[in-house]
C-alpha cells in the first residue's frame, strides 16, 4: 500500500543503487499529466526527478489502471462495483509491465532516459461487464458506487487516510471527466516488448476462473 513514506523509501533505494554501482534502474510509477495535482501521482513524479538527479541510467514506466484490480471489484456474484461512473479509463495487464521492464533491463541502451506510458486500451466498467458475460457465459452487471463509500470502507479497514483520499480524488475526477488520460499510449507496449499488449478480453479469458462462480 502506498503512502508518503514511499518518498523516503525510494530515495534510500536510489542512494543504495548508486552506492553499489548499479548501471540502470527501471522505475514503475503512474501514467499522469506532467502538471498533475493528484497527490500520490506527484509523489511518483518526485521519485522520477530524484532518479534523474542521481546520474543513474534510468527508464520510467508509467502504467495505467491494472486489469488485475478488476477482481477486487467483484462483489455479489455477477456484479462489478466501481467508483468511476461511465468514464473509460485506460487499462494494462501487469504482466505486460513486467515484460517491458525485462526488455529494458536486457538492453538498457535504447531506453536510457526514456519514459513509457503503458496501456492496452480504454474501456468503461459497463463495457467490461459486457465482455465478462461473453467470456464466462454468465450474466454480469455494473453497479456504480460513490467514491466516498470506497474511502470510508478502506479507512475503516485500516488503510492510510491520506493515500485513500488521493485514490478517492482519482475516482471523483475520472467520473466527472476532469482527469484526462494521456494520449497516444496504446502502441508503447508493442513498440518496446515486440508483441501486442494484452487486451481486456484476453486478460479476462486467461483469468476466467477468477470471475466465474
Image (spheres, grey):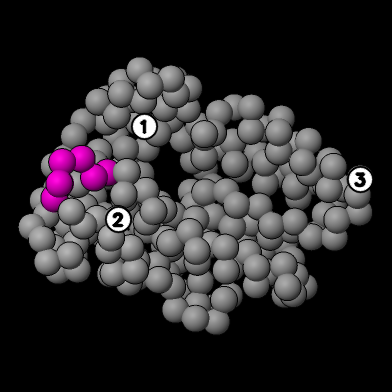
Q: Position of residue 173 (x, y in %)?
A: 31, 38
Earlier residue among tags 2 and 3? 3
Circle 1 sits in a helix, a strand or a loop, which is it? Answer: helix
Q: Report helix, strand or loop for mark 2.
A: helix
Which circle's residue, 2 or 1, is located before the other in the chain? 1
Label 2–label 1 contact, CB within 8 A: no
Residue drawn at x 69%, y 57% as measured from the top left: 26
Residue under label 3: 19
**Is 152 in the magenta?**
no
Q: Is residue 85 visible?
A: no
State the residue at coordinates (31%, 38%): 171
For the residues labelled 2 and 3, say whether their Cβ atoms are less than 8 Å apart: no
Name the main secondary structure of what is drawn in magenta.
Answer: loop
Question: For the residue carrying disc 1, how many other residues have a C-alpha within 10 Å: few (<14), some (14-19), or many (20+)?
Answer: some
- Picture coordinates of residue 197 (x, y %)? 43, 73
Residue 111 vs residue 130, the one in the foreground: 130
- Residue tagged 1: 169
Taking the image as shown, residue 69 lies to the left or right of residue 201, namely right
Magenta stretch: includes residue 75: yes
Q: What span is colored magenta in the figure?
A: 73-79
The quadrant in which residue 50 appears is: top right
Label number found at residue 210: 2
Whichever of callouts 1 and 3 sits on the residue coming sooner in the sequence is: 3
Amino acid at each position: 500500500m502506498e503512502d508518503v513514506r514511499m518518498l523516503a523509501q525510494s530515495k534510500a533505494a536510489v542512494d543504495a543503487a548508486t552506492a553499489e554501482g548499479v548501471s540502470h534502474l527501471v522505475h514503475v510509477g503512474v501514467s499522469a499529466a506532467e502538471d498533475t495535482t493528484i497527490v500520490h501521482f506527484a509523489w511518483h513524479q518526485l521519485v522520477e526527478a530524484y532518479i534523474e538527479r542521481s546520474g543513474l541510467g534510468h527508464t520510467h514506466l508509467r502504467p495505467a489502471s491494472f486489469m488485475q484490480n478488476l477482481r477486487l471489484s467483484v462483489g455479489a456474484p455477477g456484479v462489478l462495483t466501481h467508483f468511476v461512473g461511465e468514464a473509460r479509463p485506460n487499462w494494462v495487464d501487469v504482466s505486460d509491465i513486467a515484460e517491458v521492464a525485462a526488455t529494458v533491463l536486457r538492453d538498457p541502451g535504447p531506453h536510457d532516459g526514456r519514459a513509457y506510458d503503458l496501456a492496452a486500451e480504454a474501456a468503461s466498467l459497463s463495457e467490461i461487464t459486457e465482455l465478462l458475460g461473453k467470456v464466462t457465459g454468465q450474466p454480469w452487471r455494473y453497479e456504480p458506487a460513490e467514491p466516498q463509500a470506497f474511502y470510508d470502507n478502506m479507512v475503516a479497514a485500516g488503510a492510510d487516510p491520506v493515500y485513500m483520499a488521493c485514490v478517492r480524488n482519482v475516482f471523483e475526477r475520472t467520473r466527472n471527466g476532469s482527469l484526462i488520460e494521456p494520449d497516444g499510449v496504446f502502441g508503447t507496449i508493442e513498440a518496446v516488448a515486440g508483441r501486442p499488449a494484452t487486451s481486456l478480453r484476453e486478460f479476462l479469458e486467461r483469468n476466467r476462473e477468477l470471475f466465474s462462480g
